[in-house]
Image (cartoon, rainbow, N blue to C red):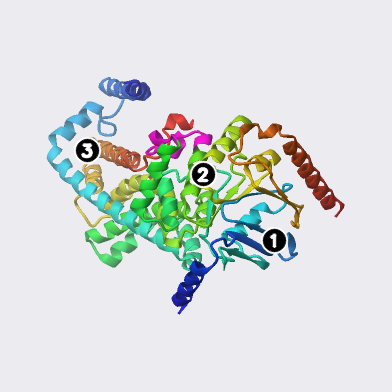
Amino acid sequence: MDNKRRIWSNIWPPLAVFSIILILWQTASSLGYFDHWIIPSPLAIVQEAATSWHRIGMHTMASVQLMIFGFLGGAAAGFVIAAALHLMPGVRKGFYPLLILSQNVPVIVIGPILTMLFGYTMLPRLLLVMMVCFFPVAVSTLNGLSNTDSVLRHYLQMIGIGKWKQFWQLELPHAVIHLFSGLKMAATYSVLSAVIAEWLGGTNKGLGSFMLLSLKGFMPERVFASTAIIVLISLLMAGLIAWVERMVVRWQPAAKDRR
Amino acid sequence: MQKEMEKAADTRCLLADKNALKLEVKDIHKSFGKAAKEVLGGLSFTVADGEFVSIIGPSGSGKTTLFSVIGGLENPSSGEIWMEGKETTGVRGKVAYMPQLASLLPWRTVAGNIGLSLQIAGVAKTEANKMAKEWLVRIGLASYADAYPHMLSGGMQQRVSFLRALLAPQNIMLLDEPFGALDALTRVEMQQWLLSIWEQNRRSVLLVTHSIEEALFLSDRVIVLSRSPAVVLEELEVPFNRPRSDDVWEDPRFIELKSRIYGLLRTGSDGGDKL
């Protein structure tokens, strides 16, 4: 009960601020401060979203599909490669610096190249999202695997733990928290990169292409509506990962204990 | 081929004298780095079956290095480690270990931590878990069996850590300043508790400590080390009966031994200073 009250007391102030902004926006719009073909009112956006719900829903499904498959594929690849590099220190020496360097490449710029290589199919878009999601997961997992507590490692080695057991019992559990911080980043990136991948063309499905289409057709309500949905999806993805983390990482002291 | 040799060694061990020394440290030298700074300068001592031996020395006398060598994490520059009549120099997994910090895996429950250590030492999983639960009841921590380590106080964590070492089937228990991180009162409580548990099943123990009282209160024999490069300055028999009473602190022999060790440590240090 106390817990619930605490959560609520954290939620209502930002919620109030957000509502006030919406109300101000709506009022300003109704009083004619904004041009409706540039900034539509919140109510108009909601109305448009409701009337064209069928189309928007279809595009949303397409985008969500791209995000989820890209996210899962990228995260899985990131995890597997992190584990492989960790278990093969020689290989890691060659690849890890490149991995870090490649983080500085804005992967999105590779989009057109992928389209050239694989044509106007779903594959280049999926690959793009996967690549974007891959890096944060790989790098943070690798960090987690190699930065285990030296005191714990010393203890386990003294009592004769083997390399595999050390991986499963010490390094992997320790990396889980790092893995999740990578996953959270990847989840946000997956939304961003999916929309941009759709902007790059080759499809008429997905919120990204729907936005472009609406922009060109002077339908700002639809642009705003798709933006709102994208933000919502992003929040949902982050929330979902945080929830799964809480389910998996049960051994951690509660946040208030740590403070 | 190698397996056969191991088998042969095992049989030899079985045939060997049952009173074989649990641990023999034979003339261990250890130097580090290019400058070859010598940390251990030819250490030799033994621990017999069921004996509780303490090592005491000025700080920086290489006790941590010594434990790493006995545990097989470090190879000595020269010298050998033997356990139960077999050479185990550089072989890991031959010791049960209780480090200064409890070193419980935060993602495993208390019982799970004990179980894992026993499994690493070769105990079957079901047997390991059974032992863990059974002994947690005995030491009054049954209600914490399924708790995660962060829910326990420092003293309770050390109890679990000690129990974990006590139950492990290896030849000898190494206790590395096990109570160094506890406050004075908890420390005395823990010493009495450890003794009461240990006296029930008498494993061979090698304890490293900074505290002269702790060494005298717990052990059968105290080995005093010099400053680095460490050598054995003296070995003292502790004459008190077991089970040891709590008022052994007031025994005049206790006070006499204490001042003698203190003197040895001081001269050991002086020698170092003159260098």
As drawn, A152 above or below B156: below
Mark 2 crowdedness (10 Å alpha carbons): few <14, some 14-19, many ≥20 = many
Q: Which mark is residue B162?
A: 2
Q: Amino acid at mark 3?
A: Arg
Q: Position of residue A205 (x, y in %)?
A: 19, 50
Q: Is residue B152 magenta?
A: yes
Amino acid type of the residue tagged 1 in the rendering? Ser
**Chain to which the residue tagged by mark 3 belongs:** A
Provide the residue designation for mark 1.
B44
Q: Secondary structure at mark 3?
A: helix
Given the image, what chain letter belongs to the residue carrying mark 2? B
Q: Which contiguous range is marked in magenta?
A: B140-156
Residue B161 picture location, percent across and down: 50, 44
The N terminus of chain A: image quadrant = top left
| Label drawn at residue A222 | 3
How far separated are the C-alphas under marks 3 and 1?
84 Å
Residue placed furthest toward the right = B274
Q: CA distance from mark 2 to mark 3?
A: 66 Å
Q: Give the x, y percent position of residue A65.
A: 22, 50
Disc 1 is placed on an element classified as strand
For the residues labelled 2 and 3, say whether their Cβ atoms are less than 8 Å apart.
Answer: no
Please tell me which residue is depicted at 14% across the width and 37% down the height of the picture.
Answer: A52
Of discs 2 and 1, which sits in the foreground? 1
Residue contact between numbered discs 2 and 1, judged by CB atoms under 8 Å:
no
